[in-house]
């Protein structure tokens, strides 16, 4: 517990599970009030709903049902933050993934991924920024992209497209909103152990995860706390001159030769 974020009010999309859950818990641990905005209340991985756990630990949190593909839902989620004094931190984290053969990808599949991963971030940032501008206190927007927003992967063309858009959107928003003292940054996680990587992709425990561990200089896959700590830094005052940045949280796999643990 610290008071690093005392007085802050954070809205975290996709905050019920995985990375978003750990981000919500961590921001609350450091003093923020948190609005968890998600399609579902129960964590995909099981356990007490995020907002209840924050309450149990002495913090303030609310759950609001929100589909980030619906702009009115996003605005409603940000409105809930007014109950705590108004949003100061927006974490656009909700995301989905599917591996698919590029040559077989259907239009509806493309649109679904772009709607959640890109449009949801765009209008989440807009909903929060409008409130932040109205309140005149500035703020911090953190968009959760991926290392798939930095490098291309042939079995994830849709996902890379959606996450690359988040990276450039972040840079453009940093320029558009800096004049209001609103900073906009992105976190780019590598492989992280969540329901997405375990159940949707089936990667955890597979040869791909073992290969990631072998080729990553730190020799392990990521945990949601790794993503949460990077988000905490970008959300709060310790990054007050950081704007339009891509913070890569991947154990070093993207920026190195990647031969680390090969025999
Ligand atoms: N897990 C990884 O390896 C990894 C790596 C890089 C980036 N990421 C990114 O991290 C973010 C979180 O992923 P995760 O691994 O925690 O996934 P997860 O599936 O474990 O959790 C995602 C949460 O988002 C919610 N969600 C999904 N669609 C939504 C929608 N339309 N509206 C509102 N909420 C919605 C889900 O209900 C769930 O609670 C995503 O943006 C993902 O792309 C994950």
Image (tube, rainbow, N blue to C red):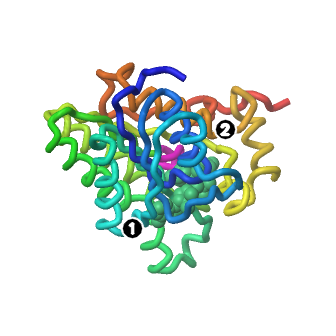
Q: Is residue 19 something one can see in this rendering?
A: yes
Quadrant the N terminus occupies? top right
- Which residue is label 2 attached to? 223
Say if 89 sits above or below 201 in the image.
above
Q: Horizontally, is 256 left or right of 31 in the view?
A: right
Say which label, 2 or 1, has the lower sequence index: 1
Residue in the picture at 67% in, 33% down: 258
Residue in the picture at 47% in, 55% down: 63
Image quadrant where residue 195 sits? bottom right
Q: Is residue 189 something one can see in this rendering?
A: no
Say if 172 sits above or below 41 in the image.
above
Task: Examine the structure image and report whether residue 141 is included in the region drawn in magenta.
Answer: no
Question: At which x and y percent is residue 27?
Answer: 48, 34
Question: At which x and y percent is residue 38?
Answer: 49, 59
Q: Horizontally, is 142 left or right of 128 in the view?
A: right
- Which residue is label 1 attached to? 69
Image quadrant where residue 154 sits? bottom right
Residue in the picture at 56% in, 53% down: 16
Image marks 2 and 1: residues in contact by CB distance under 8 Å: no
Say if 257 sits above or below 109 in the image.
above
Q: Horizontally, is 257 left or right of 131 in the view?
A: right
Please state the extent of the stretch shown in magenta in the rendering: 145-151
Quadrant the C terminus occupies? top right
Q: Give me the C-alpha separation between circle 2 and circle 1.
A: 26 Å
Looking at this view, name the residue that lies furthest to the right.
Answer: 263
State yes or no: Cβ of the residue under disc 1 lies below 8 Å from any atom of ligand 1: yes
Instruction: Please state the quadrant of the image where ligand 1 appears.
Output: bottom right
- From the viewer's side, name the closer residue of 101 and 7: 7
């Amino acid at each position: 517990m610290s008071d690093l974020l005392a007085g802050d009010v954070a809205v975290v999309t996709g905050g019920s599970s995985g990375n978003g859950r750990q981000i919500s818990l961590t921001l609350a641990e450091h003093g923020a009030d948190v609005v968890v905005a998600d399609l579902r209340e129960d964590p995909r991985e099981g356990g007490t709903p995020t907002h209840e756990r924050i309450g149990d630990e002495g913090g303030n949190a609310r759950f609001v049902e929100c589909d980030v593909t619906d702009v009115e839902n996003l605005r409603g989620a940000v409105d809930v933050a007014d109950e705590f004094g108004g949003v100061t931190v927006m974490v656009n984290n909700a995301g989905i993934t599917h591996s698919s053969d590029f040559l077989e990808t259907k239009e509806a599949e493309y649109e679904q991924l772009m709607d959640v991963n890109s449009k949801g971030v765009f209008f989440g940032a807009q909903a929060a920024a409008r409130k932040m501008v109205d309140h005149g206190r500035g703020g911090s927007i953190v968009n959760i992209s991926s290392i798939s927003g930095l490098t291309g992967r042939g079995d994830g063309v849709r996902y890379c497209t959606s996450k690359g858009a988040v990276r450039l959107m972040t840079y453009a928003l940093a320029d558009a909103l800096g004049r209001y003292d609103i900073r906009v940054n992105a976190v780019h996680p590598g492989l992280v152990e969540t329901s997405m990587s375990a159940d949707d992709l089936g990667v955890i425990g597979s040869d791909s995860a073992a290969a990631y561990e072998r080729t990553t200089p730190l020799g392990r896959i990521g945990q949601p706390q790794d993503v949460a700590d990077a988000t905490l830094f970008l959300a709060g005052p310790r990054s007050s001159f950081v704007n339009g940045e891509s913070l890569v949280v991947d154990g070093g796999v993207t920026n190195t030769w990647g031969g680390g643990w090969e025999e």
